[in-house]
Image: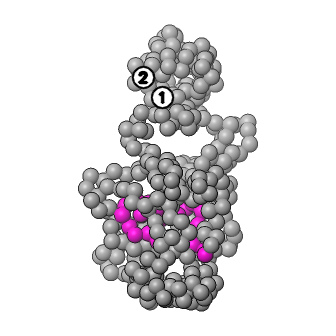
Amino acid sequence: MQGALAGLKVLDLSRYIAGPFCGMLLGDMGADVIKIETPEKGENTRAFHPRVADSSLYTMVFNRNKRSMTLNFRHPEAQAVLRDLMQQADVVIENFLPGTLEKMGCGWDVVSKLNPRLIMTRISGFGASGPYSNEPCFDMIAQAMSGIMDLTGQPDGPPTMAGTFVADYSTALYAAIGTMGALQSRERTGAGQIVETTLLSSSLSLLVTAIPKFMLFGQGTTRNGNRDRFVAPSNTFPTADGDWVILQAPEDKFKFLAAGMGRNDLAIDPRFATNAARLENVEALEQEIAAWTSTQSTDAVLAMLKEGRIPSAKVATIADVVNNPQVQHNGNIIWTKHGEHDVPMQGFTVNFSETPMALQRSCPGIGEHTEEILSEWLNLSSSDAQRLRVAKAI
């Protein structure tokens, strides 16, 4: 069966995470995604470790379901080829510094006239205009500037990055959503448009109530460790096995927790009788719970919590994750072929009943499909491609 976006032509000019991951999502849904790379070197992440068969795992997990061709962006003939490709494309994804495409003669003012139906998805740190528009930005910078780092970590510890690239990943998701919204708009109007998203704005969207809380009441939001801000008890607790278990026992669940601990007295203690009281006395409550969990095995703690249908889980290591039966049942890990090697990676996160996501291609080699793409998209011959290669345009 064809994917939901079968027939869609996408040029992915991006590098690192946010842009490539956006392009990969469109490819997972069936779009023909062409990854444009620098000749010989490829995109920046191809040099990253760890590696399999001298290829970067980092590149692989963001670039499946794509074909690769090379273009020397500095070469006038390559810039002409890029304009021709844009004329055939439905979507262009780019995350250059603002003004880079314009310097190549491939800015929106030019290509929108060549292809009025084109959707240009632009990803940047801060946006195409404004005081920081020309500043470089990576995930950690967005986490710091958005306040995410200041909200993350233990109350008496330093600001801490999230354990993964939350700014990049969320930006990729917004970019993909925005692209599909623009495609739907084009169905009605026939006109393309620019879709712009930034690492900073994506990160700000993750702050829950921190912004209105400060602007309305002048109240800051501080680091809270693993403790929930609105419900108690809700935190991580140690077990006798050296593991950590996270649990949340709101209103009606707290009495089940107290009973399972053999501490019915806690449920009627005025300090813990209501959620508001538990929040006010959270440290004393957590000490009581930790005193119990630390004497129990992980399995015993989880069994008791499961019996009371109290939301809970072991804080999993990656070894736990890959062996999790629900992860395996959901197909959350898939295997791709890279040369003679089988390589596992994250699977598909959206299930379609009629147009399923599918693994059509593993991560391509640098420029692996250059001549194929020039022929299919631009009807150029092998001799045309050879001329461009000799001229060092591709």
Quadrant containing the N terminus in the rendered view: bottom left
**Which three-letter amino acid code belongs to the residue tagged 2?**
Lys
Secondary structure, mark 2, is: helix
Decide which of 63, 8 is in the foreground and name it. 63
Eyeballing the image, is 280 above or below 111?
Answer: above
Find residue 312 and name its label.
1
As drawn, 384 above or below 282: below
Magenta run includes residue 16? yes
Q: Quadrant of residue 296?
A: top right
Q: Amino acid at mark 1?
A: Ser
Residue at position x 47%, y 73% from top?
Answer: 369
Find out whether the residues at labels 2 and 1 contact each other: C-beta distance under 8 Å: yes
Figure colour scheme: one colour
Residue that appears at 64% across and 70% down: 41
Location of residue 309 by image quarter: top left
Q: Is residue 31 left or right of residue 131?
A: left
Is 269 inside the magenta-drawn segment? no
Can you identify the residue that label 2 sits on?
Answer: 306
Q: Residue at x 52, y 33 (%)?
A: 320
Which is more toward the observer, 62 or 315? 62
**On-image quarter of the C terminus:** bottom right
Q: Is residue 69 visible?
A: yes
Dot 1: element: strand
In this rendered view, identify the residue nearer to me: 24 or 60: 60
Q: Which residues are magenta?
A: 15-39
Of pointers 2 and 1, the one earlier in the residue sequence: 2
